[in-house]
Amino acid sequence: MADVDVLIVGAGLSGVGMACHLERELPEVSYTVLESRDALGGTWDLFRYPGIRSDSDMYTLGFRFRPWMGEKAIADGPSILEYVRDTAAEYGVDRNIRYGHAVVRAEWSSADGEWAVTARSGGSDVTLRAKFLVSCSGYYRYDQGYSPEFPGREQFSGTIVHPQHWPQDLDYTDKQVAIIGSGATAVTLAPAMAPVAAGVTMVQRSPTYVVSAPAKDPLAMSLRRFLPNRVVYPVVRAKQVLVTTAIYQLCRRYPDRMKALLRKYQTRWLPKGYDIDTHFTPSYNPWDQRLCLVPSGDLFREIRKGRVAMATGGIETFTADGLRLTTGEHVPADIIVTATGLNLLAFGGVELVVDGEPVDMPNTMAYKGIMLSGLPNFGYIIGYTNASWTLKADLAAEYLCRVIRHMRRKGFARCVPVRDPDVALEPFLDLDSGYIKRAQSELPKQGSKAPWRLRQNYLRDLVTLRHGRLLDPALHFARPGAAALVPHAAPKPETPERVTA
């Protein structure tokens, strides 16, 4: 007998959002959220480095159902954490979270029609049974960031820190700081540390596209003067969706024109004669990797003031007092920050088993970017790579609620996507970023066509996930007592019908 109808793994932005959607749309459904750490908030509770903030605007990073009330469009980490906590409290989600429960194994039984989920808590194992399992643990390791082996690291006499494990007592006042990295974390840290450090140098093997965005949204600030926030929020949210989608599509279709446009803006933001080609012109096209946002050009402003310097080139070795690059340049440092990225981990590293057979994750295929082939009553929430995480998280949660509602109405015990062997395999995530390429072999695959293709397009997903037909030949429903599914068997589709959300 199941303990709950739905078990959610992870109490971050995705897990809280999923639970809120259940509260709003299926209040009769019981659920529990298991969180490995001792607090909710996920990323926004874990990362504590200086300047931590979103790299998406809060009108799309905020939940669709709960307007962001803050003035800042690009918000700081503590404000986002407060927003997530307040949302959980408002919807009563915080009452259903079990902290200190690290899920290690989940086993599906077709005979029982439920998942047996094992979590480690306080040195012992606890098992909960659920009819439906939703993974909201993101895709990176919380306990360990990526830190490559650097030659001569042991020679350095100063302090080395990774942003994922920032010591709260670290004093960088009047210290020379070298930040290794060129991504979102590095461009956040540099301007945040610069005002009190003796000097900050961003050391990058290769450049990243960095663009400035207003810290406060001009349209939102104008509309709020005479309209309530409940009216302003969806208007600004829609505007942001259209703008970000347009920028992404233009970058993909007209990369040379967008490179020229980005360079034009960088010429305005940076000092006259600055070496843009070396420090801010990547070898790849815009949006082959994520664009880095800096609110109100704070990084460029610190470069103009002379408090942040850029050093581009490979690291030859650490030295006693800094870094020596392959270009011959020596970067002095008392503190070295290795903002070198994340380690990806599919679904929190949970061991998944279906009817006694361990799931071979790289051999599964993503269905609509929300479920996996061969895994019954299983969903996951992973946001967009080219837009706000929450845009996809909201749609995914709504879609899973539709699936669960349909199963309850029709008396189904099992729902599983069945993979079409004729659909070609493609990488799960299509960005060229190093942290993604390092883990592609361990991730599921996506397919070459719908519904197996992982669209990075909110407007198209909005139509198919929120308003489109739920039933589909690839999605197999079964009633209690049905035999276990034969992998890759082609099921008979249910009689087509439109299911309203």
Image (spheres, rainbow, N blue to C red):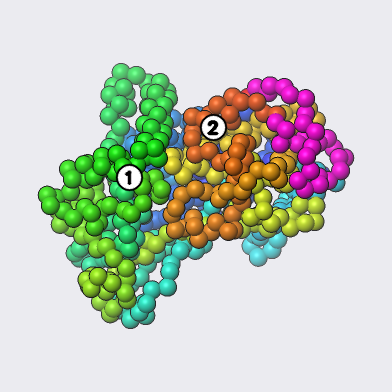
- How many numbered callouts? 2
**Quick check: is 479 in the magenta stretch?**
yes
Residue 346: image quadrant is bottom right
Q: Which one is nearer the viewer's eye here, 414 or 451?
A: 451
The disc placed on residue 461 is: 2
Report x, y in % for residue 367: 64, 41
Looking at the rendered structure, the secondary structure element under dot 2 is helix
Q: Quadrant of the N terminus?
A: top right
Does residue 207 appear to the left or right of 347 in the view shown? left
Above or below 230: residue 443: below
Name the residue beneath numbered marker 1: 293
Q: Earlier in the sequence, mark 1 or mark 2?
A: 1
Question: What amino acid is labelled 1 in the image?
Answer: Leu
Report x, y in % for residue 281: 28, 52
**Quick check: is 329 in the magenta stretch?**
no
Above or below 179: residue 500: above
Q: Is residue 369 visible?
A: no
The disc placed on residue 17 is: none
Which stretch did the figure color magenta?
472-500
Q: Residue at left 31%, top 56%?
A: 207
Q: Is residue 282 visible?
A: yes
Q: Which one is nearer the viewer's eye here, 109 or 261?
A: 261
Which of label 1 and label 2 is nearer to you?
2
State how far apart marks 1 and 2 are (Cα): 24 Å
Q: Residue at left 77%, top 31%?
A: 493
Report x, y in % for residue 233: 40, 26
Q: Which one is nearer the viewer's eye here, 148 or 274?
A: 274
Looking at the rendered structure, the secondary structure element under dot 1 is strand
Question: What amino acid is labelled 2 in the image?
Answer: Asp
